[in-house]
Image (cartoon, rainbow, N blue to C red):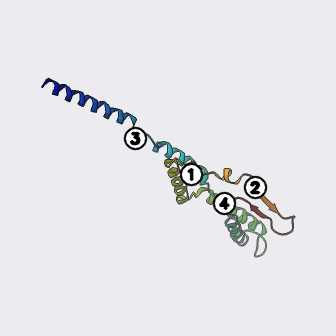
Amino acid sequence: MQRRKSGRLFSTALLSAFGLALLAALPARGDSGPEAERCAAEAEAYANQEARASVSGEDVAGAAMDGAVVGGLAGRGPGDWSARGAARGARLGGGLATLDALSNSREQDWQALYAKAYYACLAGEPRPATRQERCGSSAIITGAGQGPLIGTSSRENCR
């Protein structure tokens, strides 16, 4: 009887030691990936940098022309048209269009950039490239004062 108890005790101890050895050999799963908080901070910084508001030259020019018409018709001057009022209206219209564009950040664009960077971080992939990293100095502008200037770039998504 004594032999059976010692045999069970030995086998239980051996099995326990073997089980502990197996558990120690397994990699820790709880902290094997990137931290969600770190990824959120990196994604927010990336989205804030990339989602800058853009000013459309066409919008500014259109608002300046509207301002010129209103200013020219409403300005004080001899006759039906005021050149001084038109100039003031054009400056005011263009300036307001620029300020509007700078103050309107598109929430959808920011959210898309954030999600792109966040999920790349969680997957362990490198952060998406910024405009400066994508574009560098590859722009070419042609035109010698005759006609419009044409800008081109050899890299994708450069503006």
Q: Report the mark closest to the observer, 1 or 3.
A: 3
Q: Say which residue label 2 marks.
A: 138
Q: Earlier in the sequence, mark 2 or mark 1?
A: 1
- What mark, if any, has residue 30 been given in the picture? 3
Q: Is label 2 in a helix, a strand or a loop?
A: loop
Q: Position of residue 68 (x, y in %)?
A: 72, 69
Residue nearest the observer in this picture, 125 or 100: 125
Q: Is label 1 in a helix, a strand or a loop?
A: helix
Q: Position of residue 99 (x, y in %)?
A: 64, 57
Q: Report the mark closest to the observer, 3 or 4.
A: 3
Badge 3 local density, few (<14 within 10 Å), some, or many (20+)?
few
Q: Earlier in the sequence, mark 1 or mark 4?
A: 1
Q: Say which residue label 4 marks.
A: 157
Q: Position of residue 11 (x, y in %)?
A: 24, 30
Compared to residue 16, the image places residue 36 above or below, namely below
Between the residue at mark 1 and the residue at mark 3, the CA separation in whole angstroms equals: 28 Å
Residue nearest the observer in this picture, 91 or 45: 45
**What's the residue type where badge 2 is placed?**
Ser
- What mark, if any, has residue 47 been given in the picture? 1
Badge 4 local density, few (<14 within 10 Å), some, or many (20+)?
few
Quarter holding residue 71: bottom right
Q: Position of residue 90 (x, y in %)?
A: 72, 65
Between the residue at mark 3 and the residue at mark 2, the CA separation in whole angstroms equals: 45 Å
- What mark, if any, has residue 25 been given in the picture? none
